[in-house]
Amino acid sequence: MFCRVLWDIHVVDLADVDDVGRILGEATNTVGPTGDRCVAYLGPPLRTAAPELAVGIDSDHGRAVLRWLPDPPLYGVDLSVPAHPDLLSFYAGNHDIRPDPVWTCRPAMTRIRPVTARQAVHEYATSGQRPTCVQWATDST
C-alpha cells in the first residue's frame, strides 16, 4: 500500500500506482449530495496521517484545482492557462478535512487543466512529494 485516496464517503488504499488514474477518475466524476463533483484527497497510507494533496476536476469547464494541504496551504497553478471567469464549486466530502462541505474556488485557483491535475496526482502518487509539474501559489496570490 503506497497511497490513500478519500472522497465523498469513500476511502481506498492503493497498492499499485497504476490504480491512481482509475480511482481519480471515479472520485472526481462522483457527484456529491450538493450537486458538485467531489474533491479527491490523497495522502500517505497511514490511517492517522492527514491527506496532503486535494484535487477537483471539472471536465465540463476544462478546469481543475490542486491544493497542497500541509502548512502553508498552496494552490497549484499553470500560468500559461487563463483563469476560468466563474467560481467553480466542488463537494469536499465528509472526512472532517474541511469544515464546509462545499469548496468554492476563485478564478485564480482554476488555472489548471484536467490533464495537468492528473499528471500532478500521478507525480504525487509515485514520489510522495509535492508535485513539481505546476507552480504553487499562496491563498493571497
Image: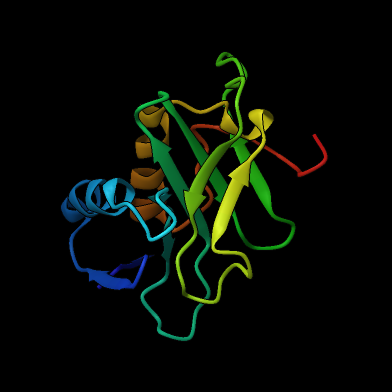
Q: How many marks?
A: 0
Q: Position of residue 86 (x, y in %)?
A: 60, 26
- Front residue of this view, candidates 127 and 71: 71
- Quarter where residue 88 is shown: top right
The residue under the point 53% across, 50% down is 130
**How is the structure coloured here?**
rainbow
**Rendered position, 65 above or below 26:** above
Q: Position of residue 83 (x, y in %)?
A: 61, 21
Residue 64 shown left or right of residue 1 in the figure:
right
**Rendered position, 131 above or below 46:** above
The residue under the point 47% across, 75% down is 95
Q: Quadrant of the C terminus?
A: top right
Q: Position of residue 129 (x, y in %)?
A: 50, 54
The residue under the point 24% across, 73% down is 1
User: What residue occupies the far bottom of the structure in this picture?
Assistant: 48
Residue 41 shown left or right of residue 9 in the figure:
right
The residue under the point 69% across, 55% down is 73
User: What residue occupies the far front of the structure in this picture?
Assistant: 34
**Rendered position, 128 above or below 13:** above
- Quarter where residue 77 is shown: top right
- Front residue of this view, candidates 87 and 46: 87
Q: Position of residue 53 (x, y in %)?
A: 50, 56
**Rendered position, 121 above or below 50:** above
